[in-house]
Image (tube, rainbow, N blue to C red):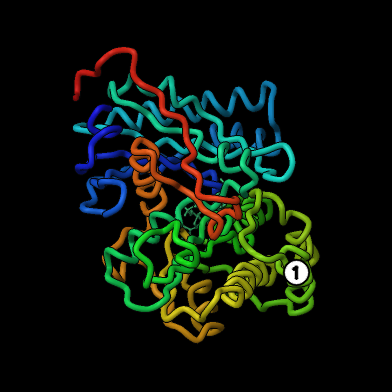
Amino acid sequence: MDKAAKGTGTVRALGLMSGTSLDGVDAAVIETDGHTLSASGPGRYRAYSTDEKAVLRAALGHWTGAKVAAAAAVVDAAHREVIAEFEGIELVGFHGQTVAHEPRGRGTLQVGDGASLTDVLGVPVVWDFRSDDVAQGGEGAPLAPFCHFACARKIAAQAPICFLNLGGVGNLTYVDTSFDQPEADGALLAFDTGPANAPINDLMQARLGAEMDRDGAVAARGTVDEGALKRFLAEPYFARTPPKSLDRNDFEAAAMLVDGLPDVDAVATLTAMSVAAVVRGIGLCPQPPTRLLVTGGGRLNPVMMAMLATALDCPVEPVEAVGLDGDMLEAQAFAYLAVRVARGLPTSCPGTTGVQRPVGGGRISNPTRAGSLV
Ligand SMILES: Nc1ncnc2c1ncn2[C@@H]1O[C@H](COP(=O)(O)OP(=O)(O)OP(=O)(O)O)[C@@H](O)[C@H]1O
Ligand SMILES: CC(=O)N[C@H]1[C@@H]2OC[C@@H](O2)[C@@H](O)[C@@H]1O[C@H](C)C(=O)O
């Protein structure tokens, strides 16, 4: 902890992300001083079982009560398991599972008890990353943009670029690479674009009993319903000025626009909706980006990627094109943010969450006993 909190040197941090797709826990190690991404270490994925997913899903939209407690227990147990697989870690960044997100209402809730995880490795755990930002008037999301800024510097991007995360929800980060610090006015613009994979997964589950539209195989056989797509784009969210953020199920009503369509057309239309939301998002950036680097599971959907490439004027590539890991970038981001929190550096700013001034959110819990591995 001393090194992470007081030092300026590099910290070996483990980031843990349980995303809105509800598929599992991503865990990834990086080395950083809170500014530069110096190295990335091993990554692990721990899938949730069908029963665990059902418990998490049942808690969505709830703030308290037995369903939330049960989801927290699932999240804690899965994370204990995955953390124990790592060694030589100095600090953990634990996101938890978002079950409810209403930044201008009841707040934001990520379940999972970071304090209880400190004893697994005997190192401090940074958690509850979003609450301070929301308490100070911000959206509380997205938070990966400060890490995207570091990625842009790592790859020595010379012109404005965008990072797009296609998880359950989509989020876009515009990086103006002429700035030295992410919190500088104009360096970043970030926001959630709209639904990405969540409605596709939900429909695949409900109609076909499948987890996802793997490789876009179902969408590839369908025809996009232009009427449904047009009605989707009439949602007021798209006209809102960014920064802005979404809860996983905010677009549930829009997803019902495909209810009467055959399976293949419904999935093709939902895929086109996720893409159209991104295209709208790109239109809100200060300048057209010179390239779009895509992370998250949606980059593995060739139909979604082809639709994006057709609709946009810039190259659309998975982040692997620049040597980054698209399965682990969000987990790496929470390792990066943990080091920033430990060092008192901001993790969000007006351009990323709409907060009035830069905020360093997150709670730090210290271990009650030293672990055997450090
Ligand atoms: N081969 C594939 N073909 C199509 N879709 C895929 C493929 N692999 C993953 N996906 C989609 O990506 C999803 C997982 O993405 P990811 O792990 O980025 O989400 P997440 O981290 O839970 O979400 P978020 O970033 O919103 O919190 C899967 O649920 C699925 O919908
Ligand atoms: C409230 C919340 O958990 N939001 C997630 C969600 O999943 C994607 C998108 O919506 C993004 O805003 C955020 O996660 C990413 C990792 C972030 O904070 O950058």
Q: Where's the N terminus, which quadrant?
A: top left
Q: Is residue 294 left or right of residue 238?
A: left
Q: Is residue 42 above or below residue 68?
A: below
Q: Is residue 237 left or right of residue 18?
A: right
Q: Is residue 179 above or below residue 124?
A: below
Residue 240, percent across and down?
71, 65
300 and 183: which is toward the camera: 183
351 and 301: which is toward the camera: 351
Q: Is residue 323 left or right of residue 103?
A: left
Q: Is residue 86 visible?
A: no
Is label 1 in a helix, a strand or a loop?
helix
At label 1, counting other C-alpha atoms closer than 10 Å, the crowd grade (few under 14, some 14-19, many 20 or more) is many
Q: Is residue 107 above or below residue 266?
A: above
Q: Say which amino acid is labelled 1.
A: Phe
Residue 2, percent across and down?
25, 27
317 and 38: which is toward the camera: 38
Q: Which residue is at a point 27% across and 33% down the rendered structure image?
A: 6
Q: Which residue is at a point 29% across and 25% down the rendered structure image?
A: 123
Query: What is the quadrant of residue 44 in the picture?
Result: top left
Query: What is the quadrant of residue 94 in the picture?
Result: top left
Q: Where's the C terminus, which quadrant?
A: top left
Q: Is residue 100 visible?
A: yes
Residue 113, percent across and down?
49, 24
Q: Is residue 275 left or right of residue 261?
A: left
Query: What is the quadrant of residue 221 in the picture?
Result: bottom right
Q: Which residue is mark 1?
A: 232
Q: Which residue is at a point 36% across and 41% down the rendered structure image?
A: 15
